Amino acid sequence: MGRAARPIAKSTSSQRFNSTLRQGNVTHHEYIQVGKGRDVGLNQVAVFEGKVAGGNGEQVLSRDIYRLGQLLDFFRMLSFYFTTVGYYFCTMLTVLTVYIFLYGKAYLALSGVGESIQIMAEISDNTALSAALNTQFLFQIGIFTAVPMVLGFILEQGFLRAVVSFVTMQFQLCSVFFTFSLGTKTHYFGRTILHGGARYQATGRGFVVRHIKFSENYRLYSRSHFVKGLEVVLLLVVYLAYGYNDGGALPFILLTVSSWFMAISWLFAPYLFNPSGFEWQKTVEDFRDWTNWLLYRGGIGVKGEESWEAWWDEELWYIVGPNPIIYYSHYDVQPYSMTRDHWGSAEWSSVRSIACC
């Protein structure tokens, strides 16, 4: 019982919404059970998670969510939030909180207000203000997205074996993977809410024990991880250069270690999990292929895999249209020239329906 829509196979959650709205009075006929291949490569996992996150972003804009929010009681609403869009919404809030924290620190550093506030707090013995200025911002580490999995291990294997499994996973760079996954879900979920236009993406599920070229990784992770990772690094460098810290290097490390970990994970995880990622010959070939991709001119019939110019045009498909308007994205903290007629597009018909209700 899927939803009739132009982009097919985008999300199958609408059948659960319809079943709940109809009080379970629906029939389901299952004829065959098929096992699908499992995504084991980083690129396959990232594409799949991006597809699911984009589908959850469309659910936020759908009238089904609006109607269920009006009809469910408080406790069922909590369960509904946790089992649908709540996880992705909290993930996006976590990353946004990191940006707010870093931009706040950069503002205090560049304006010089941070030093005066810190001195005033020490003179007046205002411990609450001092604690607020020196908060060790640790809760944004992507490892906390693995907490439900750890609890599942404890339930299935016992506490001791779960701890051993968790420590083993850290040696396998589990924290790096989950932090990288945090950025994937946040990017696609937030972009779909801002611009709409979630679409089906085939993951392939092919043979993945092969080297992925740098140009392919760049095309897939540029907007979602590399740009944002460099932005976080720039903010941390500004805070390091101009911030006031009378306690030496240790307070700065405690304040920013998790942000550095997040930025490094976003920038280098595709190469850590890439087979033969540090082999010199493949590195030279990747650099040559990347420069050829950058210098190749785009045009009619040229695909994004062949030219940077064609790829850039494809990256802007969700904000390109016939009627230009100015749109400011607080999520990306940069202005966009939004050239899409939102209220005339099929993706925003659900928002239009909510407004009519």
Image: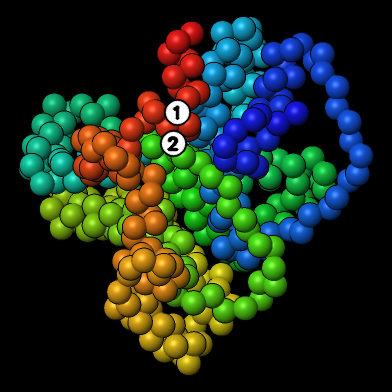
- Which residue corresponds to the image point at 13% horizontal and 34% vertical from the top-left? 117
How many C-alpha atoms fall within 10 Å of the one at disc 2: few (<14), some, or many (≥20)? Answer: many
Does residue 88 appear anywhere in the picture?
yes
Side of 207 relative to 177 (left or right): right
Instruction: Label 1, secondary structure: give it.
Output: helix
Question: Residue type at mark 1?
Answer: Trp
Q: Residue furthest front?
A: 300
Work out whether residue 136 or residue 63 is closer to the camera in this orientation and state it.
63
**Which of these two is toward me, 106 or 219?**
219
Identify residue for label 2: 196
Locate residue 196: give its quadrant: top left
Relative to residue 115, is residue 57 drawn left or right? right
Residue that extends furthest to the right in the rendered view of this protein? 31
What x and y, as percent, mark residue 327? 24, 35
**Cβ atoms at labels 2 and 1 below 8 Å apart:** yes
Tell me the quarter of the picture where residue 250 sits.
bottom left
Distance between the Cα atoms at labels 2 and 1?
7 Å
Q: Residue at x 16, y 50 (%)?
A: 243
Q: Position of residue 289 (x, y in %)?
A: 41, 82
Give the x, y percent position of residue 142: 50, 48
| Residue with the mark numbered 1 | 348
Q: Quadrant of the N terminus?
A: top right
Q: Nearer the N terminus, badge 2 or badge 1?
A: 2
Query: Seen in the image, is 13 located left or right of residue 179?
Result: right
